[in-house]
Image: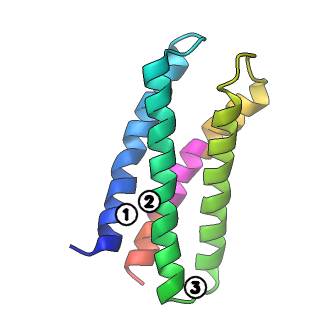
């Protein structure tokens, strides 16, 4: 199996686990329990690492053009936004509602844009 495809597959399989663990955390009240919260953060970091490795490999082998460049930039910005807003929610003080909304929206949008980006990367 192609190593790039394997990294894509790992990232795509981590995505539903991250979303489910995020929903679990949202349903539970603050303060978050240590294991689920740490697992959610660790899986999110692994997800970002595998995704960046795939995108980096793509840039080494190909020169993206047009829509692909915008899709990659949008995906990376959404991933960064989701990660930063998630980190802001980990503080003791409850976050503002705009941070919570931004985290939800960026997380769901990245769950759409990353598979689309991977599809285009793999089948280009």
Q: Nearer the viewer, mark 2 or mark 3?
A: 2
The residue that mark 3 highlights is 64
Image location of residue 1, percent across then percent down: 20, 73
Image location of residue 54, percent across then percent down: 45, 69
- Circles 1 and 2, Cβ within 8 Å, touching? The answer is yes
Q: Is residue 117 visible?
A: no
Where does the magenta region start and end?
107-115
Question: Above or below — where is 84 with respect to 51?
Answer: above
Please state if 116 lies on the left or on the right of 75 as rendered: left
Give the mark nearest the N terminus, 1 or 2: 1
Residue at 43% over, 31% down = 39
The residue that mark 2 highlights is 50
Within 10 Å of the Cα at label 3, are there few (<14), some (14-19), or many (20+) other Cα atoms?
some
Please state if 7 lies on the left or on the right of 109 as rendered: left
Task: Give the CA distance from mark 1 to mark 2.
Answer: 7 Å
Question: Above or below — where is 63 with respect to 119?
Answer: below
Residue at 52% over, 64% down = 52
Circle number at residue 8: 1
Q: Can you say which quadrant of the picture contains the C terminus?
A: bottom left
Q: Tag 2's secondary structure?
A: helix
Q: In which quarter of the image is residue 35?
A: top left
Predominant SS of the magenta segment: helix
Residue at 61% over, 69% down = 71
- Whether residue 55 is in magenta: the answer is no
Question: Above or below — where is 4 with respect to 113?
Answer: below
Q: Is residue 35 visible?
A: yes
Residue at 60% over, 52% down = 79
Please state if 79 lies on the left or on the right of 19 as rendered: right
Within 10 Å of the Cα at label 2, are there few (<14), some (14-19), or many (20+) other Cα atoms?
many
Q: Quadrant of residue 30?
A: top right
Within 10 Å of the Cα at label 1, are there few (<14), some (14-19), or many (20+) other Cα atoms?
many
Image location of residue 3, percent across then percent down: 30, 72
């Amino acid at each position: 199996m192609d190593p790039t495809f394997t990294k894509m597959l790992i990232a795509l399989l981590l995505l539903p686990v991250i979303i489910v663990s995020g929903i679990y955390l949202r349903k539970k009240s603050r303060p978050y329990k240590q294991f689920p919260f740490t697992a959610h953060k660790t899986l999110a970091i692994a997800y970002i690492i595998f995704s960046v490795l795939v995108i980096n490999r793509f840039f080494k082998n190909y020169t993206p053009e047009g829509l692909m460049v915008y899709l990659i930039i949008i995906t990376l910005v959404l991933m960064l936004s989701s990660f930063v807003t998630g980190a802001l929610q980990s503080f003791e003080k409850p976050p503002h509602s705009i941070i919570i909304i931004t985290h939800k929206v960026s997380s769901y949008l990245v769950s759409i844009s990353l598979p689309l980006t991977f599809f285009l990367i793999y089948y280009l």
